[in-house]
Image: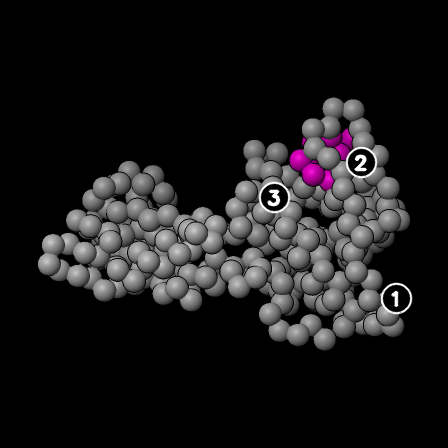
Amino acid sequence: MSGQPSVLFVCVKNGGKSQIAAALMRKLGGVDVASAGTRPGSVVNEEAAAAVAELGASMAGMTPRLLDPAEVAGFDRVVVLGTEAVVEPVAGMHGRIETWITDEPSSRGIEGMERMRLVVADIASRVETLYEELTGRRGPQIRVFEPALCCNTGVCGTDVDEALVAFTADLEHLRREGVDIERRNLANDPSAFAENPVVAGFLQVAGSAGLPLVLVDQITVATGRYPDRAELRRLAGLGGDLGLTPTRGCC
């Protein structure tokens, strides 16, 4: 394991629900993820893969595999999806086993992709809750690297930088909502720029004139400008979810 929190998703065939949960958790990042089956099939469910892809996650390259009972000990959480699969505790395990009784639309006569989208939406909601529990944060890490400023509030003597004033207010608003967002000033914290390979590489190409630089989980999402509150909320996965739950109707 990498030192990150870890989770193992288990179902019977390891072709559908456990693979869905694993793909959605991998999309969020910051968690070591695995999945397995108690009686694995031979292929991943194509409708499951398609429904997961609609949420920007991927099951590409995944194949069902048999659960090794001994591996249960190494995970912080073992999640069994459905009641058919049974996973027993093993000696030395430091995590715990829990069962998710997920939605089954077929019991209501709903089949095909309509059914699968409902299944994925239900699992996505559960994954988001587990993610928050395992990582202690609501969503992605947002880091803002700013040019050398005498005052990052935007108010320096008689001069007022309206963009900075607005950004400071937006940042504090998101922090109150639990978003993991921080800003670094080149004048006050140059080591943060030098020690981050993405930022250091950016400065070599664009120089400080290209700042501010906004990273989400080390991915560049904005340069040379400050995102407004709506964009920051989107980057943070706010609006009721972490970016997994569909905002459109699923049917």
The answer to whether residue 116 is above or below residue 65 is below
Q: What whole-number distance in Å separates the C-alpha atoms at marks 3 and 2?
A: 25 Å
**Residue type, label 1:** Ser
Residue under label 2: 68
Structural distance between the alpha carbons of marks 1 and 3: 30 Å
- Identify the residue shown where x is 69% and y is 28%: 94
- The residues colored magenta run 70-78
Residue linked to disc 1: 107
Q: Nearer the viewer, residue 103 or 113?
A: 103
Residue placed under numbered mark 3 in the picture = 133
Q: Position of residue 52 (x, y in %)?
A: 67, 62
Q: Nearer the viewer, mark 3 or mark 2?
A: 3
Along the line of sight, the residue nearer the viewer: 186 or 167:
167
Does the magenta-highlighted stretch encompass residue 181? no
Q: Which mark is residue 152?
A: none
User: Eyeballing the image, is 218 above or below 235?
Assistant: above
**Is residue 71 located in the magenta-colored stretch of the structure?**
yes
Where is residue 106 drawn, in percent x and y?
86, 67
Instruction: Give the class, few, some or many, for how many residues have Cα within 10 Å of label 3's Cα (few <14, many ≥20).
Output: few
Point 31% across, 50% down: residue: 145
Name the quadrant of the N terminus: top right
Q: Amino acid at mark 2?
A: Asp
**The quarter of the displayed image where residue 70 is located:** top right
